[in-house]
């Protein structure tokens, strides 16, 4: 989404959740991701001088951004080069409700919001392919060799079926999903988690290969469950996926504690979402009322924040 008025442009992007398939997606297996209503916004207007950036992490010249934000500066510079406006002075304000490093796609959302705002400022409307290419610059800095699932999910308004190197497709989900998200308060480390899976693969290839194949099968079964609207089967598939993520070595005690708390509170199934080793968990609730109860129980169990939403309504309830 983008808007423009009086020499100012605004770009927005939503966050994402990986329903099933994380880590296996790195090995070319399918995954399913979906939009999450938390949003990032970039507000851009012209100024005299150089490019300035304002955010909760850093405010100042874009040329002096801290290392963890270098991907954003590269993405902005690449976009301006593409638009033939590299010499313009700009003030870019980033306002994001997406917590950093939680597996919710904050880096991709901020990059998408910036690219959309810049495009709109200069009267250009990028295609999905152009957006993907420009945002990929930031994601490469953030994750090393990203699968692309964050960008694809955040550029879609519907759940997606994603497989690296193949065309992404949207999924028609028969019934409303009630999803609860619990934040451990600890930043995950996708790059380290991916490296850990690779190390485990090298040390015990048969075990890890079998787990990756099982995650791929779970993704296929999840797709069918979503199309049929079988929420109880979907819940059991989330549990199966979490078991394999534990085998891969990307879950941890804090994540496991929240997952168990959600299931003890009535969740149909639960798992980590994203890279793991911190970050967030997701739980499937049978209805919105139960979802809000689960969300409150996650706070009691140690989550620093929790959200509940229904996919049909798009309303986000924060605990």
Image (cartoon, helix red, strand yellow):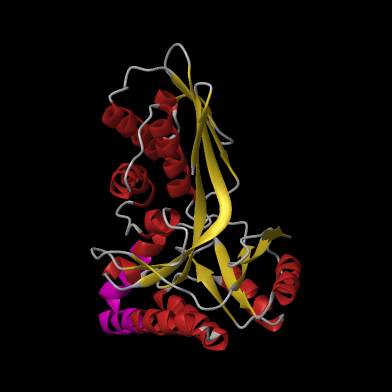
Residue 68 coordinates in the image, percent (x, y): 44, 40
Above/below status of 264 relative to 8: below
The stretch drawn in magenta includes residue 200: yes
Query: Residue sitting at 38 percent across and 29 percent down?
Result: 123
Considering the whole magenta stretch, tell me its main secondary structure: helix
**Camera-side residue of 231 and 62:** 231
Instruction: Give residue 71's quadrant in the image.
Output: top left
The residue at 43%/48% (across/down) is 108
Residue depicted at x 39% and y 79%: 219
**Above or below, 125 relative to 229:** above
In the image, residue 133 above or below residue 222: above
159 over 216 or under it: above or below: above
Which residue occupies the foreground of this view, 165 or 61? Answer: 165
Q: Is residue 140 magenta?
A: no
**Can you name the residue that lies furthest to the left here?**
165
Comparing 47 with 139, the one in front is 47
- Residue 106 in sight: yes
Place of residue 195 in the rendered image (x, y in percent of width and height, measured from the top left): 34, 62
Residue 68 is left or right of residue 77, and the answer is right
**Residue appearing at x 37%, y 17% in the figure:** 88
242 left or right of 150 in image: right
The percent position of residue 255, horizontal first and vertical second, equals 58, 69
| Residue 164 location, quadrant | bottom left
Q: How many marks?
A: 0
Q: Residue furthest top?
A: 48
Q: Is residue 99 visible?
A: no
Quadrant housing the C terminus: bottom right
Bounds of the magenta segment: 195-214
Q: Is residue 22 left or right of residue 284?
A: left
Q: Position of residue 187 (x, y in %)?
A: 54, 54
């Amino acid at each position: 989404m983008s808007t423009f008025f009086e020499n100012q442009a605004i770009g927005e992007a939503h966050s994402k959740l990986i329903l099933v398939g994380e880590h296996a997606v790195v090995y070319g297996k399918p995954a399913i991701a979906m939009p999450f209503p938390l949003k990032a916004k970039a507000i851009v207007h012209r100024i005299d001088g150089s490019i300035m950036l304002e955010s909760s992490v850093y405010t100042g010249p874009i040329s002096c951004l801290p290392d963890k934000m270098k991907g954003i500066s590269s993405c902005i510079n690449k976009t301006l080069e593409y638009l033939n406006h590299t010499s313009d002075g700009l003030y870019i304000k980033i306002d994001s409700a997406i917590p950093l490093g939680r597996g919710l796609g904050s880096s991709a959302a901020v990059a998408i919001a910036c690219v959309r705002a810049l495009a709109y400022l200069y009267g250009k409307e990028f295609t999905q392919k152009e957006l993907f290419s420009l945002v990929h610059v930031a994601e490469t800095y953030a994750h090393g060799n990203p699968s692309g699932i964050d960008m694809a999910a955040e550029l879609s308004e519907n759940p997606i079926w994603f497989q690296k190197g193949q065309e992404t497709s949207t999924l028609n989900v028969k019934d409303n999903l009630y999803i609860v998200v619990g934040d451990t308060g600890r930043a995950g480390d996708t790059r380290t988690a991916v490296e850990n899976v690779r190390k485990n693969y090298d040390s015990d290839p048969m075990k890890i290969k079998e787990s990756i194949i099982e995650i791929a099968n779970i993704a296929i079964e999840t797709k069918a469950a979503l199309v049929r609207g079988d929420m109880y089967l979907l819940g059991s598939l989330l549990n199966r996926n979490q078991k394999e993520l534990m085998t891969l070595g990307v879950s941890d005690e804090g994540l496991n504690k929240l997952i168990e708390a959600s299931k003890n509170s009535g969740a149909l199934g639960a798992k980590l979402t994203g890279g793991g080793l911190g970050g967030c968990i997701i739980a499937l609730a049978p209805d919105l009322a139960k979802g809000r109860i689960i969300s409150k129980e996650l706070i009691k169990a140690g989550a620093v924040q929790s959200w509940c939403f229904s996919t049909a309504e798009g309303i986000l309830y924060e605990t």
